[in-house]
Amino acid sequence: MKIAVTYESGRIFQHFGHTQQFKIYEVTEGEIRSEALVDAAGSGHGALAGFLAAQGVDTLICGGIGGGAQQALAQAGIQVYGGASGETEKAVKDLLEGKLVYDPFVRCQHHEHAHGEGGHSCGDHGCGQHTCGDHSCHN
């Protein structure tokens, strides 16, 4: 099993489509055997599913993620655990132990909705220039 986690400074990056790096964990018999930090090589929303499939990934842990990306990942045979947060390695261990906290209904329509913080939308503050770590991308 290969698990990819959206990565920034040891934590789960909160906007899948803007991910610069993934931490990829190779798991055998429920144990982490190896890990590697991989650059997304400038891949955007649409190309990330193919990028992860080419890496042999079958599971993704991430923060916010849009419906289109979820569909592309499903078509690539990658199981998505969205709406997760915290440290990447802890998230992988929690997944392996069946206690990962995630949102199976997560949707990040990042430029199409207000986040509920005073009614602003990400388009108002230059989304893509931050990690969305200060607010949730979930509906």
Image (cartoon, rainbow, N blue to C red):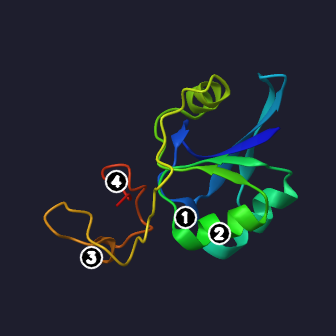
| Amino acid at circle 1 | His
State the residue position of label 4. Answer: 136
* CA gap, disc 2 and disc 4: 21 Å
Residue 111: x percent and y percent?
38, 77
Residue lying at 77% horizontally and 23% vertically, measured from the top left: 30
| Amino acid at circle 2 | Gln
Give the total number of marks visible in the rendering.
4
Residue lying at 47% horizontally and 52% vertically, measured from the top left: 14
Of discs 1 and 2, which sits in the foreground? 2
Q: Which comes sooner in the sequence, label 1 or label 3?
A: 1
Q: Nearer the viewer, residue 122 or 57?
A: 57
State the residue position of label 3. Answer: 124
Measured along the vertical axis of the image, is residue 90 above or below residue 88? above
| Amino acid at circle 4 | Ser
Residue lying at 63% horizontally and 22% vertically, measured from the top left: 97
Q: Nearer the viewer, residue 134 or 26?
A: 26
* CA gap, disc 4 and disc 3: 15 Å
Badge 2: residue crowd in 10 Å (few <14, some 14–19, many ≥20): some
Q: Is residue 109 visible?
A: yes
Q: Are marks 1 and 3 in contact (CB under 8 Å)?
A: no
State the residue position of label 2. Answer: 71
Q: Which comes sooner in the sequence, label 2 or label 4?
A: 2
Of discs 3 and 2, which sits in the foreground? 2
